[in-house]
Image (cartoon, grey):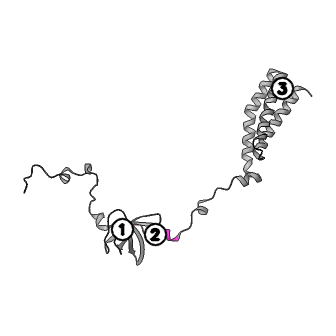
Amino acid sequence: MDIWAWALLLLLTGLVLAVLEMFVPSGGILGFLAACSLIGSIVLGFRYSVTYGIVLILVILFGAPIIISVGLALWPRTPMGRRVLLDVPTSEEVLPEDPQKKVLKSMVGQVGVAKTKMLPSGVIVIQGRHIDAISDGTPIEPGESVRVLEVRANRVVVRPLKAETQPVEPDDLLSRPVDSVIPDPFEPDA
């Protein structure tokens, strides 16, 4: 056999071993043998002629990634690929169906009455149903009307109705008017 035939045989062997490395768990041994075969193919190609060696380098540079990408595309369809790569679950499979959460989300915007003192959590009554709720930060007295703002982690967040009608004074002193922070220095003391 001529030296060019051995170079071609080593090239094909290296490409087959590179693809087998993806399908057969060998701990990198097949990949090492593939690299050795491809390097040996290039060396034998250059011993035959410079042109043949350059052609083999180009075939390896462009052909090997194409063959490996085709192997990776086929790998999930193999028995080992199906065992290693699990199917991506859909949101219906992952998220639990919670009818209580749907009922709570339907209450957003409704008005109820605080049954207990809410500092910050307590019980509210909406349409005759007792529901655990959290205040949005302000204390709520029993009997006070509240509005449902949102449902956060199966907890109903409420705000007193009187807080909605009154403007909330900002906590930041810089955003308040000066007259509300310090007294007017030109007013006579009484």
Label 2 packing within 10 angstroms: few (<14), some (14-19), many (20+): some
Label 3 packing within 10 angstroms: few (<14), some (14-19), many (20+): many
Q: Which mark is residue 179?
A: none
Q: Which residue is mark 3?
A: 44
**Residue type beneath disc 1:** Arg
Dot 2 falls on a residue whose secondary structure is: helix
User: Which is nearer the N-term, disc 3 or disc 2?
Assistant: 3
Q: Which residue is mark 1?
A: 147
Q: Nearer the viewer, mark 3 or mark 2?
A: 3
Quick check: 152 above or below 38? below
User: Which is nearer the N-term, disc 2 or disc 1?
Assistant: 2
Residue shown at 72% from the left, 45% from the top: 72
19 lies left or right of 141: right
Residue shown at 63% from the left, 58% from the top: 89
Which stretch appears magenta? 99-110
Q: What separation in Å lies between label 2 and label 1 (alpha carbons)?
A: 13 Å
Quick check: 3 above or below 68? above
**Residue type beneath disc 2:** Leu
Residue shown at 83% from the left, 35% from the top: 12
